[in-house]
Image (tube, helix red, strand yellow):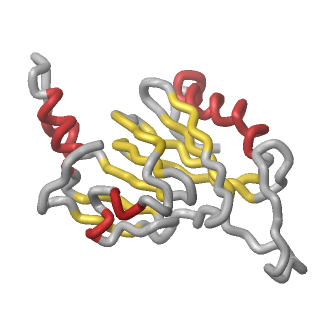
Amino acid sequence: MYEIDDKDKVVPLKDVPQSSVGAPLPLVVADEDQVVLAYYLQAKRPGWDGRSVRIVDPLTSEEPVALVRFNSCSAHMFGPPNDEAFAGHPLAGRGLHPYGVFQIDNSSWIRKLERMNSVHSQHNPERFWKLQHLIFLFHDSTFECVCRDFEIRRTQGPIVCLIAEMVRLLARDAETGGSSFS
């Protein structure tokens, strides 16, 4: 984890699809340059009154899924805190809240990455100014990354059946020479 200072500013991202608050079952596939995140979306089935428990699993559930591809991803973390330990996140008191998606303006993490890289003989601090720090807060985990940009596509589960598609998205630029998200 990183340490924050008074410059970090939490900004909610409203246009990102809401993860399931019960069982988003996030899945991450990554290489050295891209990361693809998949998670079940918050969705109410027609005719479901909310009085019974629906079991959602990664192998069989035909739920709506968000696929998020993070381009030029410099770093990522996936794990704690969950929603019950959320108050332990360094940005919890700055407007970050469970089940949301946020961008961190003037991120301490990005500034730390830039300082780490400053020993490189061809260090260019401007490269870091173009990066964004994103946080996706799920029921049982948190995903954070520093990337150039990201793209979102909606599809259907089961979520584990999307692993091959996620791997294809990692290699997309090498195969096509482009960056369209299809």
**Residue 53 location in percent, x, y?**
81, 69
- Occupied quadrant, residue 87: bottom left
Q: Is residue 10 above or below residue 173?
A: below
**Residue 32 location in percent, x, y?**
43, 24
Q: Residue furthest top?
A: 121
Quarter of the image with the C terminus is top right
**Residue 132 location in percent, x, y?**
31, 49
- Occupied quadrant, residue 71: top left
Residue at screen point 24% across, 59% down: 105
Q: Is residue 91 above or below residue 170?
A: below
Horizontal side of 130 relative to 46 (left or right) equals left
- Occupied quadrant, residue 167: top right
Nearer to me, 23 or 74: 23
Q: Is residue 39 above or below residue 31?
A: below
Horizontal side of 163 relative to 4 (left or right) equals right
Residue at screen point 43% across, 52% down: 81
Quarter of the image with the N terminus is top left
| Total numbered badges shown on the rendered structure | 0
Residue at screen point 70% across, 34% down: 163
**Residue 84 location in percent, x, y?**
48, 62
Nearer to me, 33 or 42: 42
Residue at screen point 52% across, 33% down: 178
